[in-house]
Amino acid sequence: MTAQQAIRRLNVPPYDVHRVLLDPLALPAWNPAFHTLDGPAHAATGVTYPITVRGGLTGSWEYLAIADQRIDTAWHVPGFRETAVWLLEPEDDGTLVTHEFRHAGPLAGILSQAFRGVAELRLDRLTQRAHQPRVLM
């Protein structure tokens, strides 16, 4: 099993971080490991979202818990499972975000070096995405 954690202060309110993390169909736009993710456009626990990842493997992705200051997710493909936590702590006019994840399975062991630094990269991408203006419908 491998695990990583990274912490970053984002100069956006928790609402904007939530907006990004709770937009399941947009996850492939900022997580290059995901090629496609299908299902409802709204975030909900108890819903399985079919996913295709880099290398063409298929599996599922889901929200395990959704709260104001914590979002838990998981995804798996044959031989690989990730469980992740996003902690959001309001801080003045921004948000302190802690992202941690754990990988399990035989494929996770093989790919462990490829995931080195990924927690920081995800926070970089989350920061960029959270700073993009919201599109109002």
Image (cartoon, grey):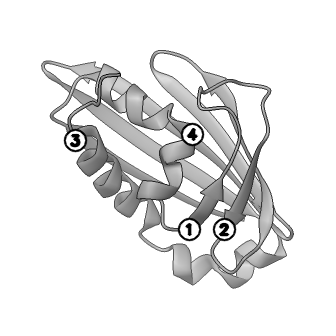
Q: Which residue is outermost to the front?
A: 137
**Direction from residue 135 to residue 65 in the image, left or right:** right
Q: Earlier in the sequence, mark 4 or mark 1?
A: 4
**Which residue is rendered at x = 30% and y = 23% of the image?**
136
**Which residue is rendered at x = 65% and y = 80% of the image?**
111
Residue 106: x and y in percent read 83, 76
Residue type, mark 3 in image: Gln
Q: Earlier in the sequence, mark 4 or mark 3?
A: 4
Residue linked to disc 4: 24
Residue type, mark 4 in image: Pro
Q: Mark 3, mark 1: which one is toward the viewer?
A: 3
How far is mark 2 from mark 1, CA to CA?
Answer: 6 Å
Residue linked to disc 1: 33
Residue linked to disc 3: 132
Pointer 4 with pointer 3, Cβ within 8 A: no
Q: Earlier in the sequence, mark 2 or mark 3?
A: 2
**Direction from residue 56 to residue 97 in the image, left or right:** left
Indicate whether 94 appears above or below 50: above
How far is mark 4 from mark 3, CA to CA?
Answer: 16 Å
**Which residue is rendered at x = 30% and y = 46% of the image?**
129
Residue linked to disc 2: 53
- Please identify the quadrant where the N terminus is shown: bottom right
Q: Earlier in the sequence, mark 4 or mark 2?
A: 4
Q: Earlier in the sequence, mark 3 or mark 1?
A: 1
